[in-house]
């Protein structure tokens, strides 16, 4: 098992718990630091890269990624792929793994099939509380919940988002006005059909090798949008791979690092204003069917070209994306 995190903090209780379990299982924790730290990271089964060691990597992307940005995590993905990972898990250092986190993971997931078109608030399927994931359009929060299948089905889900208890990944609007902590119900997994959208994040997400080209986190957007807009591109490209996105019960418990909620709100404004427009833009693209790496990369490129053309992301993103495509194509 290979797990990727990025951090500016010394080892946290969550990272220590993950590293200890990985040592017992023969796994690897990849830790990507940033300009503000940490200086070292003494944990078992851990491979830590500070800024200096990142810049010495042989990846095309290594010397071009901006500093002080969450998208430096891209280097962790490439390192895991380079080491031969067939599946990687990304999480955050403020997550404590629950027992279910260590269960075997398969691309074939069983659960309820969601065939609704448009937005689906998956959090509402795991809770009776009024809650929605970060990145879910605010204008859709009060929309009726579409029906999902009641019978269990099995489908390939090359990307699987596990939920997080106590302090799940919700937006700043939710945190200002709604109660926390909260625990999700241990309901069946939810499998999203083509045309059914829900944002997913980097908090507790499993990626299988054919989907590795979709891991790319954009740099020319805010910290609070990079993984959300990545999730929209990934979902759109998954459909052309004949696969889908799955959501599972909570397998981590988050003890959230300190955040400035007003700063979070400010960084989420581009999403509040544009997330549904981005969905519509991506949904209308004529992408190629197939799961060969060159086809998936071509589809990712088309998605970002469209987002740049519409003004959601500035043009310099395309140069970084090409470096990512060069790197990941040599590894997958």
Image: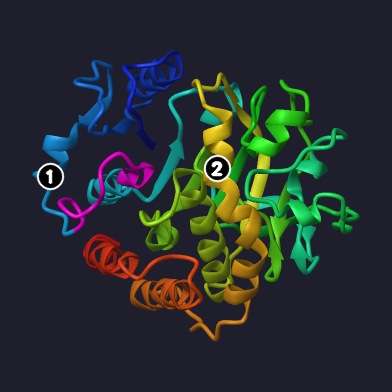
SS of the residue under disc 2: helix
Name the chief secondary structure element in magenta: loop
Q: Is residue 12 above or below residue 190?
A: above
**In the image, residue 296 lies in the stretch drawn in magenta:** no
**In the image, residue 62 lies in the stretch drawn in magenta:** yes
Q: Residue furthest top?
A: 13
Q: Which residues are magenta?
A: 61-73
* Residue at numbered disc 2: 266
Q: Of residues 226 and 106, which is closer to you in this image?
A: 226
Q: Position of residue 163 (x, y in %)?
A: 64, 36
**Horizontally, is 232 left or right of 25 in the view?**
right
Residue count near mark 1 (Cα–Cα under 10 Å), binned few <14, some 14–19, many ≥20: some
> Which residue shows up at 22% across the image and 67% down it?
326
Determine if residue 107 is in view: no
**Horizontally, is 97 left or right of 137 in the view?**
left
Q: Position of residue 30 (x, y in %)?
A: 30, 34
SS of the residue under disc 1: helix
| Numbered label attached to residue 55 | 1
Q: CA distance from mark 2 to mark 1?
A: 30 Å
């Amino acid at each position: 098992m290979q797990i990727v995190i990025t951090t500016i903090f010394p080892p946290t209780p969550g990272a220590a718990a993950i590293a200890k379990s990985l040592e017992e299982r023969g796994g690897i924790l990849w830790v990507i630091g940033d300009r503000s730290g940490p200086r070292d990271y003494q944990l078992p089964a851990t491979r830590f890269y500070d800024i200096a060691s990142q810049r010495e990597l042989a990846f095309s992307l290594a010397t071009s990624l901006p500093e002080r940005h969450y998208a430096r995590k891209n280097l962790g993905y490439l390192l895991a792929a380079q080491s031969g990972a067939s599946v990687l898990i990304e999480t955050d250092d403020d997550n404590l793994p629950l027992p279910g986190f260590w269960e075997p993971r398969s691309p074939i997931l069983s659960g309820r099939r969601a065939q609704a078109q448009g937005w689906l608030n998956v959090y509402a399927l795991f809770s009776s509380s009024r809650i929605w994931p970060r990145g879910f359009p605010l204008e859709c929060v009060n929309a009726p919940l579409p029906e999902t299948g009641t019978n269990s089905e099995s489908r390939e889900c090359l990307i699987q988002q596990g939920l997080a208890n106590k302090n799940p990944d919700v937006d700043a609007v939710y945190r200002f006005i709604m109660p926390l902590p909260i625990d999700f119900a241990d309901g069946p997994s939810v499998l999203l059909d083509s045309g059914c959208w829900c944002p997913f994040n980097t908090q507790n997400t499993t990626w299988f090798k054919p989907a590795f080209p979709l891991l790319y986190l954009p740099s020319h957007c805010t910290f609070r949008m990079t993984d959300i807009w990545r999730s929209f591109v990934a979902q759109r490209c998954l459909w052309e791979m004949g696969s889908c996105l799955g959501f599972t019960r909570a397998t981590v418990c988050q003890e959230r690092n300190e955040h400035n909620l007003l700063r979070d709100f400010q960084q989420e404004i581009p999403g509040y204003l544009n997330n549904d427009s981005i969905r519509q833009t991506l949904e209308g693209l004529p992408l190629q069917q197939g799961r060969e790496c060159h086809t998936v990369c071509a589809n990712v490129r088309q998605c970002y070209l469209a987002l740049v053309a519409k003004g959601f992301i500035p043009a310099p993103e395309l140069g970084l994306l090409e470096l990512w495509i060069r790197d990941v194509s040599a590894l997958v």
